[in-house]
Amino acid sequence: MRKLFILTGIIILSAVIGLSSCNKDEDDDTVEGLPTVSTGVTCEVHQNSTLISGDCTDQGNSAVSAKGMVWGTSSTPTLENKLSFSNHGAGTGSFKSSLSNLTANTTYYYRAYATNSQGTGYGKVESFKTP
């Protein structure tokens, strides 16, 4: 009987530790009402230019007034702390941004964004390094 109590205690303790150490999934930070966007991967990175893409798949609770890409050298670029950004107009849909005047041998971080009356939703942060 004593072994059963000890075993039950170990199982409960393991479950509590396991649940408390779970990492939050990146998609869990979606705020209800904001647009849903995804960030594409970059291809053909050149010394001072590249092409990046995104997709606004859901407008959220109100119409999308602006969508595009935001990029910079900080690991979490936003419209507030960006190096630069593109605006591909209103509505949902996919878009591509051509980045130029980049510095050689520099890591850049980028992600898609879309804004509606609720605020701005962002896609996953991606990165690339110029040769």
Image (cartoon, grey):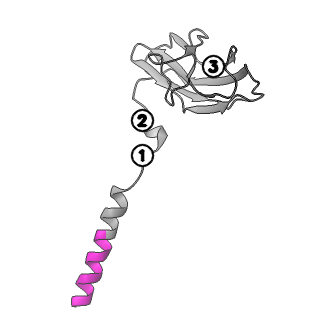
Q: Which residues are magenta?
A: 1-13
Q: Nearer the viewer, residue 65 or 126?
A: 126
Secondary structure beneath label 1: loop
- Tag of residue 67: none
Question: Magenta stretch: residue 4 in it?
Answer: yes
Residue drawn at 58 percent across, 22 percent down: 56
The image position of residue 113, as x and y in percent, is 53, 21
- Residue wearing tag 2: 29
Image-quadrant location for residue 108: top right
Find out whether the residues at labels 1 and 2 contact each other: C-beta distance under 8 Å. yes
Q: Residues within 10 Å of mark 3 (few under 14, many from 20)?
A: some
Secondary structure beneath label 2: helix
Image-quadrant location for residue 97: top right
- Residue wearing tag 1: 24
Q: Main secondary structure of the magenta part?
A: helix
Mark 2 belongs to which amino acid? Asp
- Residue wearing tag 3: 93
